Every structure is written in C-alpha cells, then in structure tokens.
Image: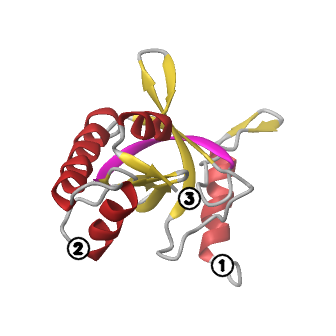
Amino acid sequence: MRGLPLSIYILSVFLYGCMKTDTVTVYKEVDPLLDSTAIYTVGRVIDGDTFLVGFGNDSISVRILGIDAFEIKHDSRLDSQAVKAHISIDSAYALGQTAKHFADSVLYKKNVLVVRDYMQSNFDTYNRLLRRIYYYNGSQLINYDSVLLGKGWALQD
C-alpha cells in the first residue's frame, strides 16, 4: 500500500467488508454541522437553553433558537434579563434554576429532534450550533422553546 494514505486504506477495507454481492452498504453518520434535521441524545444540560450532544468521539454545544432562558448564576447578564422581564434578580435567578431543572428532566440522556433554521446563523458568537429543539413526551413531539416561553422560564430571543 505504498503511497496510499492510511485513511483511504482503512476506508477501502471498511467498504470491502460491507460488500454484498454487487452492492455496497455504506453507513452514514449524521453530521450536525451539515444536516438540517437529526435525532441526538443529550449528554449534558448546561442551562435552560444550552446543552451538549455526542457526535462520534466529540460533543457539540447546541444553543436553542428563539429563547433566552434566565441565567443560572448571578452575573450582569442575569441582571439585564431581570430588567428586561420587569422582575427582581432573585426571581430571574429562580426562573433560570427552574428552566435548568426542566431541561434536565426532559432533555438529559433523552433523544431530541434537532432542526436547523436556515433563516438563522448556523453558529453563535460562542461557536454553539443554533437549532430548534423538539423533545418526545411518549410518542408526542413537543416544541421545547414554546414550553419555556409559555411557562415564563425564558424570554423571547
């Protein structure tokens, strides 16, 4: 195999192993950076509007479009959210904690439908994927951001 890059050699061995008579079966892994819609398992919830999904050996941070969940720590960002919502900082903090607990209960280690909105940027300034998120309640698919907005746990972004 002199002159043939190792990755091409490994790929050819893999494809040869997948051969069935005259057809080749290729297993496609969904790419969250390119694919418009995919189902992923949430590996870690950061807060009410940000979580991580596994992709191969990596994880990717996803930021939910359409909402700005209240922060889960006291900082200037939480202060400005409280002012925008016309509530106290302590109330904003409590709403942020509630949103995080809700996200943990419906997203953590669960399958979610991740949908790209082509009218929005693919990434935010923190290099997080920007996506619409739907979670399953039994067989019913629920729009995550609508729930947070409806409960008052997030502001419209």
The disc placed on residue 5 is 1
- Nearer the observer, 153 or 36: 153
Q: Are marks 2 and 3 in contact (CB under 8 Å)?
A: no
- Nearer the observer, 39 or 26: 39
Circle 1 SS class: loop
- Residue type, numbered disc 3: Leu
**Image spot of residue 110 (x, y percent):** 36, 34
Q: Quadrant of the N terminus?
A: bottom right
- Circle nearer the N terminus (2, 3): 2
- Residue type, numbered disc 1: Pro
Point 68% across, 60% down: residue:
120
Q: Residues within 10 Å of mark 3 (few under 14, many from 20)?
A: many
Residue under numbered circle 3: 130
- Circle nearer the N terminus (3, 1): 1
Magenta segment, which residues? 36-46
Whether residue 121 sits left or right of residue 24 in the image: it is: left
Point 55% across, 70% down: residue:
124
